[in-house]
Image (tube, rainbow, N blue to C red):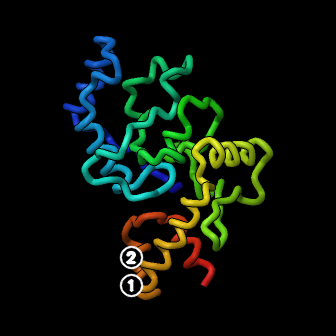
Amino acid sequence: MRKLTRTTLPVEVKQALEDAKSRSLPWDDFDKHQERRCLREMQSGMCAYCERELDSSDARTRIDHFVPQSSPLGVSRIFDWTNHYLSCDCLETCDSHKANDIKEIVNPDTDDPSKFFTYVGTGAICVAAGLSVKDTQKAQDTIDVLNLGCPSLNSSRVIVFNRMRKYLGESMLRTVIKYHIVEFHTFCEFMLSLK
């Protein structure tokens, strides 16, 4: 998970969300196409949680309500732009795994995920050392709720890093990581920091 900067919505998208809220439109009936485009751009085409590259057709993505729609606080935030992230549609991780869990987890645009997590060379994400008891719990809950430590995700991180290092070379990979967001960006940064 990497730090995101919440962008300002185009007027027409902001108006569509406000209109849907004022009409009490069911979320499933809301046309999400424009908001997906805005979220994709804000997230550099990566899942807000696991950093997988998102499907370009949006067929395998979903808009996650950070505060779940089913929670008492989430009911009023269904059409709240600041409560939305674009997530991959992997059945074992991210929003699909999170579902309606209401534990406090790291928020990619209000928290700095780099303070909460680190990695090991196997691709596994870990709770960073030196956190308060509360932040340690928040980091562990994030890993658990989003299933960011699942074996398939761990191995994907390593595969992507090794593939990029092989085809780009380490020097070029450092440059790409410095100036561009790539799949599993924070893991790639971690691996390069070990050299």
For badge 2, the amino acid type reads: Val
Residue at 51% of width from left, 28% of height from top? Answer: 68
Q: Where does the image place residue 159, in percent across and percent down from the top left?
A: 50, 73
Image position of 31 with respect to 164: above or below? above
Q: CA distance from mark 2 to mark 1?
A: 9 Å
Callout in the foreground (2, 1): 1
Q: How many numbered marks have been drawn onto this rendered protein structure?
A: 2
Q: Residue furthest right?
A: 133
Q: Looking at the image, do the residues carrying marks 2 and 1 touch, with CB atoms under 8 Å apart?
A: yes
Q: Where does the image place residue 114, in percent across and percent down from the top left?
A: 59, 58
Residue at 24% of width from left, 29% of height from top? Answer: 31
The residue carrying pointer 2 sits among few (fewer than 14), some (14 to 19) or many (20 or more) residues within 10 Å by Cα, namely some
- Kindly identify which residue carries mark 1: 168
Q: Earlier in the sequence, mark 2 or mark 1?
A: 1
Q: Where does the image place residue 79, in percent across and percent down from the top left?
A: 37, 25
Q: Quadrant of residue 117?
A: bottom right
Left of 166 or right of it: where is 27?
A: left
For badge 1, the amino acid type reads: Leu
Please tell me whether mark 2 sits on a helix, a strand or a loop: helix
Q: Quadrant of residue 163?
A: bottom left
- Kindly identify which residue carries mark 2: 176
Q: Nearer the viewer, residue 133 or 90?
A: 90
Residue at 50% of width from left, 49% of height from top? Answer: 49
Q: Where does the image place residue 10, in percent across and percent down from the top left?
A: 23, 38
Q: Nearer the viewer, residue 125 or 190?
A: 125
Left of 172 or right of it: where is 194?
A: right
Please tell me whether mark 1 sits on a helix, a strand or a loop: helix
